[in-house]
Image (spheres, rainbow, N blue to C red):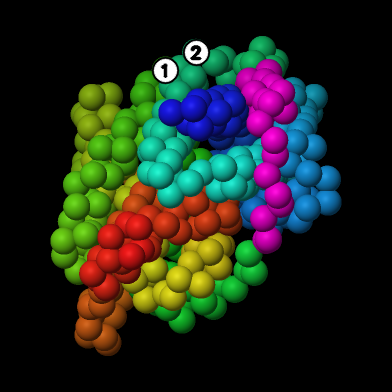
Amino acid sequence: MRLLISFTALFLSVILLQLGSGGVAPLDAISGAALGFSTGEIGLLGSAHFFGFFIGCWWAPRLMGDVGHSRAFAAFVAAGTIGILAHMLIFDPYAWAVMRMASGLCVAGCYTIIEAWLQAKVTNETRGRAMGVYRVVDIAGSLGAQLMIGVLEPASYVSYNLLALLCCAALFPLTLTRVEPPETPEAPRLRPALAWARSPLAAAGVIVSGITGAAFRMVGPVYGLEVGLGADQIALFLAAYVVGGALAQYPVGWLADKFDRRTVLIGLSVAGIAACAMTVALAGQGAAGVFAAAVAFGFATLPIYSVSTAHAHDFAESRERVELSAALMFLYAVGAIASPWVASVVIEAFGPAAMFVLIGVAHVGLIVFGLARMRARPATHRTAYTYEPRTSFLIGRLLGRERERGDDARHGKDDGGT
């Protein structure tokens, strides 16, 4: 319990970081619309965020090694705060895209440092509880960030200033904690081909997850405006998506541990296509129908990343797990960088429903590829399914022991590795 209390500073930093930087994406979307940005320009902001996120994931371990955890964390928070505050200095979509790169850099860098700190401090006895709290904090912070949009005025200095204050406040818990910072972890090598070598289906799954999640989170507010939702309703629309994904974790995890994960992935994609059709069909049926469709969409699509990563780790050796997690997150970022801009372009050309048609097509491709892979090789042993946040390249270190439980069970071992 004492060790978990010592993590309070880290978890408080996560919540403040989520509320500050996590609220920028939906606020930018509705602010861009209010300022007359085109739909394609608003989508570009989402793509810029994930480009900055990828740079932050790659750079953060190296910066920690040069200046230490606390100084690196302060530098990334400063970058995010500057990016948020600068919005009200110039109203130009391309300038905002640069600012959003700073926000993405901040999120990835800060999460990398927080997860490196957690990894160094947890033990086998406390890992499960610490990671359970970490997941709850991450989801709660994300949910709170979406709900904040309902009370923030678009294109307002006060709104962006509030988000910047929250982001900056994330400095205090971590930099003032008396807990000694850990040794700097070795940065994982980035080998995207490793993910394809271990499981082509898992590689495709995380790319489709990136396409799906980034399009909804970054361009979803534009869709909401197009179908007649107000700013407060857009907040509930985005929050419903997060709630749906949270509700799915336990039942999908149970299915992924009990049945062939390829079948579960295909089933989730089928459900995702149905949720896309449901969203389009209920667009004109009032806010309640739109919210229900968002819950269904989150339930069907948010677990795809975790199921895909679990399937990839089924074919990996213990020594490969950290690099494999980094490779899978890189592929997720590839899908996420391209998706918001493409989704915004198709909305601009064909209307709001086109975004869900695009997502549905991606899932059709995943279904076809999944069926082909089921014919290519038989199912293998399963590592323990675990919800994997898309936070940093170092998340594989934190989840490594949970992955090994599947291997221990397969060899007739207990968690002590006897």
Left/right of residue 90 with respect to residue 140 in the rendered view: right
Magenta residue span: 163-187
Residue labelled with disc 2: 151
Asked which secondary structure carries label 1, the reply is helix
Q: Amino acid at mark 1?
A: Asp
* Residue 298 picture location, percent across and down: 31, 42
Residue labelled with disc 1: 232
* Residue 338 picture location, percent across and down: 55, 58
Look at the image and tell me in which quarter the N terminus lies: top left
Q: Nearer the viewer, residue 117 or 343?
A: 117
Look at the image and tell me in which quarter the C terminus lies: bottom left
- Residue drawn at x 71%, y 23% is 176
Q: Quadrant of residue 9?
A: top right
* Residue 383 picture location, percent across and down: 31, 65
Q: Nearer the viewer, residue 65 or 289?
A: 65
Asked if the residues shown at circle 1 and circle 2 are in contact, with their CB atoms under 8 angstroms apart, the answer is yes
Q: Nearer the viewer, residue 371 or 4?
A: 4
Q: Nearer the viewer, residue 351 or 8?
A: 8
Q: Amino acid at mark 2?
A: Val
Q: How many marks?
A: 2
Left/right of residue 405 with respect to residue 412 in the rendered view: right
Label 1 and label 2: CA atoms lie apart by 7 Å
* Residue 378 picture location, percent across and down: 22, 83
